[in-house]
Image (cartoon, grey):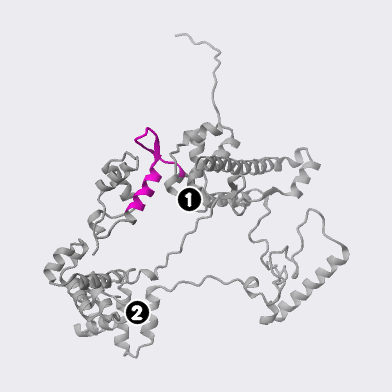
Amino acid sequence: MKTALQFKLSQQLALTPQLQQSIRLLQLSTLELNLEIEQMLAENPLLEREDDPLGECISISASGTLDAPLPVGLSDLGGSPAETTTRGEADEGEADRDSSGSTSEGDEAPADWGHDSGSRSQNDDDDEREFPQLAGAGVSLTEHLREQLAATRLERRDRALVDLLIDELDRDGMLTTGLDEFREALPAELEIDPDEVAAALRLLQSFDPPGVSARNLRECLLLQLAQSGHDQPEAKALARVIITDHLELLAARDFVRLKRVLQCDEETLRQAHSMIRNLEPRPGSRFGSDDTGYVVPDVIVRRTRAGWTAALNPDVMPKLRVNDMYADILRRNRGSAAGNLAGPLQEARWLIKNIAQRFETILRVSQAIVERQRGFFSHGAVAMRPLVLREIADTLDLHESTISRVTTQKYMLTPNGTFELKYFFGSHVATDTGGAASSTAIRALIKQLIAAEDGRRPLSDSQIADMLGEQGFVVARRTVAKYRESLRIPAVAQRKSL
């Protein structure tokens, strides 16, 4: 076989680094975008952030003095001589700057005590603004129980047993370890008697919250019922019998059989059922240590004279710029001396441009969604219309994958709540007139029908499908069951009440 040189022309699509960065930034959430920006700020000296969240904080120099003046009113709390000296030096510095004239146009305004661009109150007694309240740390269940244990007058041995039992509780406040197993795990030389462990458990079960350190659900409910202050002894006695012997029938909501077995009237059974429903099966749940997560919307929808309009949330838009000092060095030295800064300068410009393009694309997609879902913003989820990604992509002349990236982990604040942009897209359900309705609207209708049903005779999935058919929606029973389960609504047997 003879080798030879050949020329061949071909086309190949290549993604430039700038385009790759633009695609990556587009699919990031607000939190991930801030993390990306912080990393770029640490790596690129030419990039700086104008909206630095720590810009107004007090910094400490290498000598230990404060570089920024303290707020008004802090002197009322009393301060050290070093702080007083620092404040005096800051006053002199402010006076020198006032006498020499205003700052240059590109510099930020000095942080003085009386004028803070309107962000702080000028009243000295406005403690709420000058000293914002910090969020109180939640107390765990273990700490709550040990505080009560510290207030009791017990011997050291008994106090230690109760303290060990507290360590055996799970996050729901239940004791998952048997007393025999607990006693066997203790050193044999202590000679712990079973009666001592039982007495320690009874003391712990008398603590707040009611039902804590119960070994099963029945014991937990009985402890709470015994500590409740109901003034209906007959219903309370019936509730105790139900919890002890007929909890399974109550869970199945078989009230007819309960009345026959207990030989009670319907009113007393209703009162006992109400007492049991008010009990907490997980007494330690309110002492959870998990922090509440909050969603910051990227887009805010408001109603104006022109109709519903989407606008970007300014609080999530980072304000970046190129460092003026380094940019001036590059302008003055365009030769090889500034070659090391040319690359970071280009990267900084790319990042600023791509972030601006990211928010512009989010706004365009959001406005297109608002224009097609005006019924949702005016009337709620029942007026949601079917919408797919391709419809928005064709309208904005973008690729469908771009719309998918924009709508992922981006949130919109509306008068009806905060929703992810993907919430406004959904499959369609046929109507008897040949049209289509959104699956979100069907879910909202199902929720309304179940909320208005009679608790004694709840609606079955077939009945709901027939009622939707009367309104013109062609929905099968299994579709109703699927939508009902997605709404976390129990089945008809679990919704029955007295």
Left or right: 313 with respect to 216?
Answer: right
The residue type indicated by label 1 comes to: Phe
Image quadrant containing the N terminus:
top left
The x and y percentages for residue 348 are 66, 44
Residue 216 in view (yes/no): no
- Which residue is at 15% across, 68% downward? 259
The x and y percentages for residue 354 are 61, 41
- Which residue is at 16% across, 68% downward? 246
The x and y percentages for residue 204 are 30, 81
Which residue is tagged 1?
419
Residues marked 2 and 1 touching at CB (< 8 Å): no
The x and y percentages for residue 16 are 59, 33
Query: First in sequence: mark 2 or mark 1?
Result: 2
The residue type indicated by label 2 comes to: Asp
Q: Residues within 10 Å of mark 1 (few under 14, many from 20)?
A: some
Q: Residues within 10 Å of mark 2 (few under 14, many from 20)?
A: some
Q: Which numbered disc covers residue 208? A: 2
Residue 307 in view (yes/no): yes
**Could you tell me which secondary element the residue under label 1 belongs to?**
strand
Range shown magenta: 424-449
> Quarter of the image holding residue 495?
bottom left
- Which residue is at 30% across, 43% downward? 479
Mark 2 to mark 1: distance in Å? 38 Å
